[in-house]
Image (cartoon, rainbow, N blue to C red):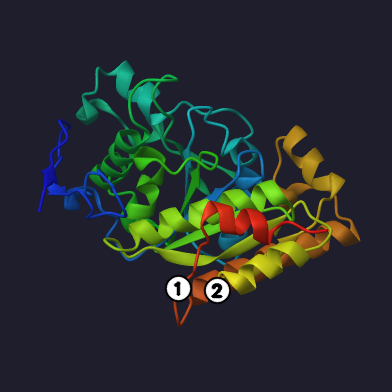
Amino acid sequence: MTTITLDRPGARPLPVRGDGEGSVQVRLDPNVQISTGAKVFAVYGKGGIGKSTTSSNLSVAFSKLGKRVLQIGCDPKHDSTFTLTKKLMPTVIDVLEGVNFHTEELRTEDFVFEGYNGVMCVEAGGPPAGTGCGGYVVGQTVKLLKEHHLLEETDVVIFDVLGDVVCGGFASPLQHAERALIVTANDFDSIFAMNRIVSAIQAKSKNYAVRVGGVIANRSAGTDEVDRYAAAANLQRVAHFPDLDEIRRSRLKKSTLFEMPETPALEAVKQEYLRLAANLWAGTVDPLVPKPMKDREIFDFLGFD
């Protein structure tokens, strides 16, 4: 079979079709795998759908259950964790550049920051726009965490991943994750993007342990279209968060929902996060085997008179 070799440290030859149809991805170097027993989740979804809000509040919910949590933001904007830390933190790439990529000169406190309720926060960052590879950044971040033995004291790792990009770089957290969670709204564009993300997860699942963990409906009064697609694609909705103004204001206040003034509606949302965290920790007995649609098929499926 034809093989491809990419000129990057740790790259190994692999079959052209070894990681999904037509893929030319580099297999994960086993030296940078997360193999400590922590439960690892990767959160995906259409750009602007609320992945960072979902990830941060899910991290807090896990911490409220007594779990040691590490959240890794995988976006050059490095804005995944600011509601936990109350400020924009330097990225792994920032600190590596500061020591000319001599990792032995870094201290843990240079790139890992404690957030609300003990959640540990890392911003992987990314290359400048139009240059480099997001996958390299994620790999270097995990390698650095292992070198500093930080994953050995972690129960839950949450990757918050840039937009709906499913190229090799930003699909790389799927190589580490046990379950991928997809955040979507109850609308055409979000569900259309979700379908493509499901296809990417299915491609990765051929070589890695990752499986779809479920769908999170966000910023939506109803879930009828999400549920209709989930039933057709053999998916499961695992949570629903409505479009509350308190959630919008929490970002402006640089705060998690668990720190906001209590209201009946917000209390219900917090309980939904705690329920989701408990269910994810308990695990899925039978991993989902979704059936994503072709673009034309889902285009027609989501149409109505």
Task: Please give the label number shown on residue 297.
Answer: none
Q: Residues within 10 Å of mark 1 (few under 14, many from 20)?
A: some
Q: How many marks?
A: 2
- Tell me: residue 194, above or below residue 50: below
Residue 171 shows up from this direction: yes
Cα distance in 3D space between marks 1 and 2: 7 Å
Judged left or right of residue 203, residue 156 is: right
Q: Which residue is mark 2?
A: 234
Image x and y of residue 195, in percent = 55, 56
Name which residue lies at 49% across and 43% down.
161
Contact between labelled residues 2 and 1, with CB atoms less than 8 Å apart: yes
Name which residue lies at 41% across and 28% down.
126
Secondary structure of residue under mark 2: loop
Q: Which residue is mark 1?
A: 289
Name which residue lies at 70% across and 69% down.
228
On-image quarter of the C terminus: bottom right
Residue 58 shows up from this direction: no
User: Which comes before the other along the chain, label 1 or label 2?
Assistant: 2
